[in-house]
Amino acid sequence: MADNDLPPPVPRKSKSEIYWELVEALKWYVAEDDINESDPENEYWVDGKKRARAILKMVEQEHTEPQYVIHKASRLPSKESYSGPTWDDIGLRYAYATTYTDIAYAEELAQRLTKANPVGFVVSEMPRDEDG
């Protein structure tokens, strides 16, 4: 196959997009599942539905607490923190997360990123969708 005959790249979804697709799938499963929950033969499916409900409850609790993102000072915050090469430059790639719940920890990381990259980094509350 010649170089100019290569197929187009498959679009990749962010972890956040995949996360929310999975949450929507669980919501659909819980809402649409119509098994007879009193039938002992359905114990496996009933357990799955209970687990799905528990996960959805955790997601709801997590997303009612503020989530913080680290971003370049010259840019508006987005739904995911800066993920560029400065993390590798300072040896803290392991500390990178798309969002943070501990603002003090996020601010410490932003200060370290700023020391290595004078463009400057700040912490902001993650923007929320219009519906939540």
Image (cartoon, grey):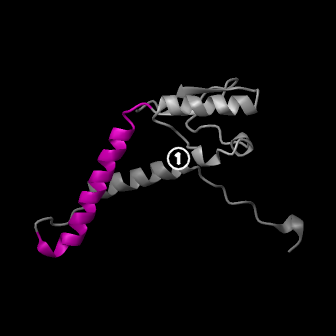
Q: How many marks?
A: 1
Q: Position of residue 107 (x, y in %)?
A: 56, 28
Q: Quadrant of residue 48?
A: bottom left
Q: Quadrant of residue 29?
A: bottom left
Residue 63 lies within the magenta run: yes
Using residue 72 as the reference point, say whether residue 67 is left or right of it.
left
Q: Position of residue 95 (x, y in %)?
A: 58, 44
Residue for badge 1: 16
Q: Residue at x 71, y 41 (%)?
A: 90
Nearer-the-camera pick, 90 or 69: 90
Q: Residue at x 72, y 29 (%)?
A: 115
Using residue 65 as the reference point, say whether residue 115 is left or right of it.
right
Task: Please identify the quadrant where the N terminus is shown.
Answer: bottom right
Q: Is residue 49 above or below residue 62?
A: below
Q: Position of residue 122 (x, y in %)?
A: 62, 26
Q: Residue at x 64, y 47 (%)?
A: 93
Q: Is residue 89 above or below residue 131?
A: below
The residue carrying pointer 1 sits among few (fewer than 14), some (14 to 19) or many (20 or more) residues within 10 Å by Cα, namely few
Q: Secondary structure at mark 1?
A: helix
Nearer-the-camera pick, 71 or 44: 71
Identity, as a three-letter code, of the amino acid under mark 1: Ser
Helix, strand or loop for the magenta stretch, by majority: helix
Task: Please identify the quadrant where the C terminus is shown.
Answer: top left
Which segment is the magenta one? Answer: 39-66
Residue 120 lies within the magenta run: no
